[in-house]
Structure formats: C-alpha cells, structure tokens
Amino acid sequence: MTKNFENFPVYIKSLDLIEKVYQFLQERSFEKEFEFNNQIKRASLSISNNIEEGSEYNNNRQFIRYLKIAKGSCAEVRSMMMVSKRLKLGNENKAEEIINLSREVSSNISNFIKYLSENIERPQSLNH
C-alpha cells in the first residue's frame, strides 16, 4: 500500500460511524445497558481497527481479509441498531442514521475489496 490508512476515505467514514455510535449511547435509556453498550462500541471500533491493521501488511490479500472482517463488523453495528429499535432504546431516527452510515461504510469496503482484488500481485511463471 502506498497510502497511509489515515488517508483512506472509508477509514475516515468509519471514524464518523464510531462518533455517531458513541453519541447515540449518551442517551439516558442506555445508562444500565452495559453489555449492549460494550458490544456495539467494540463492533464499531472493529471496523476502523481492521482497516488500520490490514493496511499495515502491505499485501493486498491480507488487507482484503481484514476488510472482510470490518465488513462483518458493519453488519454487527446494524444488527445492534435493529435491536435498539425493537427494545425502544435510544432515538429511532439516530439509530436509522447509524444503520444508513453503516451500510455506506460497508459498501465502500466492498468497493475497496473489489479494487484490491483487481490489483493482487500475481506470481510470475517460472517459464519466462
């Protein structure tokens, strides 16, 4: 990788998602929801952390592996938001914003995976 992960638009968007999740959890209805709070914080942090960690390998195959994990964490954030809506925890409009942002981050990760997949280093033939 030639760019630092800090410059990847998907990484920056993942930080926006973390910020929205933390703001969402400031609502009073979450005061005693320690397990829920911990799980969604971990899922949202996992997105950016896996983008960061994967980029450090300087290997597209490894990076793709970590991006797929980040994508899974996006789904976990969405699932937690769906649970919060069903249990009437937090503001439903803010939950929807987080769901939509998570979908956007997931889509961006998919596009990044596609780009990296098209640029995987192929082993050279021995019969050159």
Image: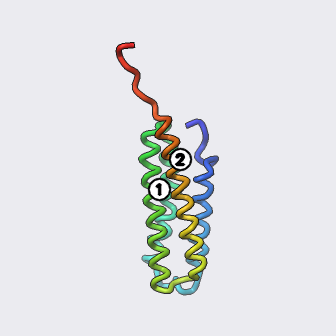
Horizontal arrangement in the rendering, residue 15 relative to residue 87 (left or right): right
Q: Which residue sits at x=52%, y=83%?
A: 30
The amino acid sitting under disc 1 is Ala
User: Circles 1 and 2: CB distance less than 8 Å?
Assistant: no
Residue at the left extreme, as displayed:
126
* Mark 1: secondary structure: helix
**Crowd rating for badge 1 (residues with CA inside 10 Å; few <14, some 14–19, many 20+):** many
* Quadrant in which the N terminus is drawn: top right
* Quadrant in which the C terminus is drawn: top left
Q: Which residue sits at x=43%, y=42%?
A: 62
The amino acid sitting under disc 2 is Phe
Q: Which residue sits at x=50%, y=86%?
A: 88
Horizontal arrangement in the rendering, residue 19 relative to residue 51 (left or right): right
Which of the two labelled residues, at mark 1 and mark 2, occupies the earlier sequence position? 1
> Dot 1 corresponds to which residue?
70
Nearer to us in this view, 116 or 62: 116
> Dot 2 corresponds to which residue?
112
